[in-house]
Amino acid sequence: MAEDHVGDRNGIGVSVSIEVYRDAWGVPHLRAADEDELAFAQGRVTARDRAWQVEVERHRAQGTTAAFLGAAELGWDTFARRARLADTARRCFERLEREDAGTAAWVRAYADGVNDGLADGAARAPEFAETGLAPGRWEPWTPLAVWLTTHILFAGFPTKLWREEVARRLGEEWTELFATDGPGTSGSNGWLVAGGRTASGAALVAGDPHRFIEAPGVYQQIRLACPAYDVVGIAVPGIPGLAHFGHTGPVAWAITNAMSDYQDLYRERLRRLPDGAVEAYGPEGWRPAAAHTETIEVAGGEPVAVEVVETDRGPVIIGVDDEPAAATAPADAAEDRGAVWESVALRYPPRVTGELGFEVLPALLRARTVADVDAALDGWVEPVNVVLAADTEGGLLHRVAGRVPVRHRANTLRIVPAWDPAHAWEAAPAPLPRAAVDGHAVMANARGIAAPLGVEFAPPHRADRIDALLGASAEWTPETITAVHRDTDNRSAAPLLAAVARLGGAADGRPPAGASPAA
């Protein structure tokens, strides 16, 4: 279908002519007069289709979900506020406005579109009435906040907390025993087959993202067209453009998570002064820490006050309220300067640099060659991804994209002492690996080109299996390569099947003879 729509752009009622066509699967195909109007259209159709999803994500980013979902969400809201997710998004958007006004306007247009479509989308989503939630207003920085919130737990700092608990309960020697490289884990897949090994001579790029079962899903199929480009791919609701999977016609790209480690946890020593101010003990001794109090509204309950503290390392996410002394005071701590307690601060690249890499998103839409994709991805920040891309001129790309700090190896494993200068980040980020494509390339969260940037990876059986399947033919087509997507061989199941067989079962999964159906 086509529709002409007069929308509200920045409160001035600018007329926008947007063509919307939905195919047999309901996938929206959007066409507009220019890139900003197209971003507005994408925001508008996303709000109409995914109103509840995008509004929940906005509230998650702001730490306000308890206001309509109740006290069960207090844990997340407290973390979101203490991690400074919304404030970091504001900082990153302000920097984007200073350094790339065009991209900032494009993101603003998307937020305007969301605001224009939210009321209609909310009217069709029963969750709003069930929770009493009224659709709110998206700010220009809200898409950046949603992106941060979507990926803040991706990079592994929860694993460092897990290792800390393992060390505390079992001993230091056990900390690296429990790793995701174990045989029971799985993750996303992707592969690239060069033109020399396809029936048509054109390269094939496949993305096979594996996600937890989600309703609605984290991805949104969409087509975006304007005079500058015509792109089809998978968007993240709440984010303009097509970040992870896209096909512009001449070039296509796909990603998997690189399993890189780019967030650090610091053990902080804090003390409160008589006037209520907070200080943190770092490499240069005691220094002021930023501190303020925020109030979380709770549906069906009393408001909760949350203190937010940030040291020179980063926002304190654990142990803000652990007074009195939970740590031994340093020797230079005067007795009248308050009791000392320990906490944990999170350091992550966008909070440090004020960069989130959103300028990459419109550049990807305009890409015509692998070189364009490669150049755009030089500005990528997070999450850190392995990227495969190919173009119609024979160009191939296999690289890591993202921002990984250079620091002491101990930072990548555990919580490290904030007062030890050995654990500071170096000014320049780590170099990003890349590799040539020899016939085909595979990515599956396993150790590979991203190995120097991480600690734990997915086991190799999926990557090995895909590699073997792709190596079995030199005449691949889009139709025949679906066999790789549909393959169910799971080499990690072999030890389990062997154990079942030893216990009297059958390797094909049937129960032992004589076993009851309920066994």
Image: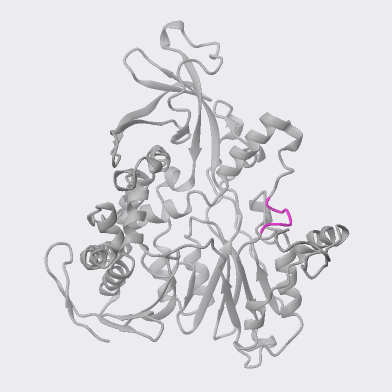
Q: Is residue 460 above or below residue 484?
A: above
> With 265 as the anchor, is 64 left or right in this view?
left
Q: Does 164 sit above or below residue 25?
A: above
Question: Could you say which quadrant of the image residue 70 lies in?
Answer: top left
The residue shown at (37%, 49%) is 60
Q: Residue at x 65, y 58 (%)?
A: 450
Provide residue 379's location: percent of width, then percent of height. 47, 60
Q: Is residue 131 left or right of residue 217?
A: left
Q: Position of residue 330 (x, y in %)?
A: 54, 14
Name the dominant secondary structure of the magenta segment.
Answer: loop
Q: In which quadrant is the C terminus drawn?
A: bottom right
Q: Is residue 382 left or right of residue 412?
A: left
In this picture, which residue range is highlighted in magenta?
Answer: 180-185
259 in the magenta segment: no
Q: How are the residues colored?
A: one colour
For the point 39% across and 43% down, which residue is it? 73
Q: Residue furthest left?
A: 12
Q: In which quadrant will I find the N terminus?
A: bottom left
Q: Position of residue 372 (x, y in %)?
A: 48, 73
Residue 101 visible in the snapshot: no
Nearer to me, 135 or 345 = 135
Q: Quadrant of residue 275?
A: top left
